[in-house]
């Protein structure tokens, strides 16, 4: 059983989804506006969010980015958008998964089960701390420090950094990162990975031309290196 925040302004969809989720044993908190959802994410810490993009007060993608700035809660986006650019934008903004409308109750329940299973497994199996040079990553606390200063990372940035840090000296392909961190192999993965690596480099104080931790192996992937 999970506490699921359902962010959807269509009453018919809300009623149908709430019934399906409740019948599956989940506790559902339905809201119709992004601002209210952000307050609940901050104050009540739901186990998972289902986020519609067509909200009346704030664009759904902007709402997703706002959620990611305050919480690591898993988010499944429900959208009618199907273009490659839209999907890349959603994944880059921090979505854990997405479903395209229309979808069945069974489909969304399967997605929820998979995302919750991965989220809980990551927390339970995470090592206490990983040290790479003057970078210290604490997976259970989802915290990373560089020279004693906390890094402000999004959920996905942290997941990528931790995955690479656990495999220092190994070249990790973009496809592996998409499979193991995003838990999916979908269109646009190379651009999505490259964007997150670029953001991480900026926060680690390095560049692709002058890497310190994250070294690109052309045509293969990226490798975390201990700079000491």
Image (cartoon, helix red, strand yellow):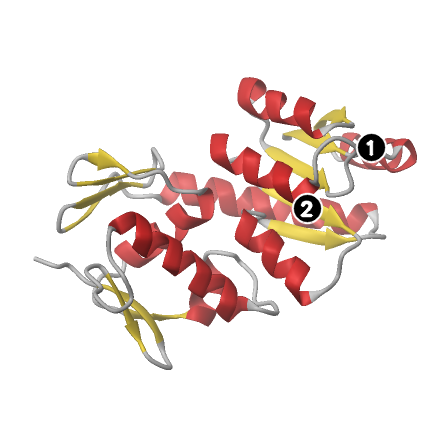
Q: Is residue 71 visible?
A: no
In the image, 3 versus 75, the foreground residue is: 75
Q: Bin the neighbour count of mark 2 within 10 Å (Cα to Cα): few under 14, some 14-19, many 20 and up.
A: many
Which of these two is toward me, 84 or 20?
84
Position of 145 with respect to 178 (left or right) is left
Residue sitting nearer the eye, 135 or 106: 135
Q: How many marks?
A: 2
* Left or right relative to 9: residue 86: left
Q: Could you tell which of marks 1 and 2 lies nearer the N-terminus?
A: 1
Label 1 packing within 10 angstroms: few (<14), some (14-19), many (20+): some
**Quadrant showing the C terminus:** bottom left
Q: CB atoms at circles 1 and 2 under 8 Å apart?
A: no
Horizontal placement of 117 versus 37: left or right?
Answer: left
Up-down: is 81 above or below 20? Answer: below
Residue 17 point in image, percent of width and height: 82, 37
The residue sitting at 55% across, 48% down in the picture is: 93
The image quadrant of residue 140 is: top left
> Looking at the figure, which quarter contains the N terminus?
top right
Where does the image place residue 226, in percent across and percent down from the top left? 15, 59
- Tell me which residue sits at (73%, 53%) in the image: 99
User: Secondary structure under badge 1?
Assistant: loop
For the residue pair 66 and 78, the one nearer the viewer reads as: 66
Which of the labelled discs sits on residue 9, or is there none?
1
- Residue assigned mark 2: 77
- Relative to 138, say whether 208 is above or below: below
The residue lying at 73 percent from left, 26 percent from top is 28
Determine the image quadrant of residue 47.
top right
Residue for point 19% across, 60% down: 212
**157 relative to 135 in the view: left or right:** right
In the displayed orientation, state which residue is furthest to the right: 12
């Amino acid at each position: 059983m999970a506490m699921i925040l359902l962010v959807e302004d269509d009453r018919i969809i809300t009623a149908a989804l709430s019934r399906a989720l409740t019948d599956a044993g989940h506790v559902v908190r339905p809201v119709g506006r992004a601002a209210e959802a952000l307050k609940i994410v901050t104050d009540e810490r739901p186990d998972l969010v289902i986020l519609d993009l067509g909200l009346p007060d704030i664009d759904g993608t902007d709402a997703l980015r706002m959620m990611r700035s305050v919480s690591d809660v898993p988010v499944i986006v429900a959208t009618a958008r199907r273009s490659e650019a839209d999907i890349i934008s959603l994944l880059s903004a921090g979505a854990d998964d997405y479903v395209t409308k229309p979808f069945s109750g069974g489909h969304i329940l399967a997605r929820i089960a998979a995302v919750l299973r991965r989220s809980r497994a990551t927390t339970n199996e995470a090592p206490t701390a990983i040290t790479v040079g003057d970078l210290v990553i604490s997976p259970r606390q989802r915290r990373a420090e560089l020279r004693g200063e906390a890094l402000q990372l999004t959920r996905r940035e942290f997941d990528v950094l931790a995955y690479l840090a656990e495999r220092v000296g190994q070249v990790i392909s973009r496809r592996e990162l998409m499979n193991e961190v995003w838990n999916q192999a979908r269109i646009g993965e190379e651009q999505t990975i490259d964007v997150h690596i670029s953001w991480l480099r900026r926060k680690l104080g390095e560049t692709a031309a002058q890497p310190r931790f994250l070294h690109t192996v052309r045509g293969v992937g990226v490798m975390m290196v201990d700079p000491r």
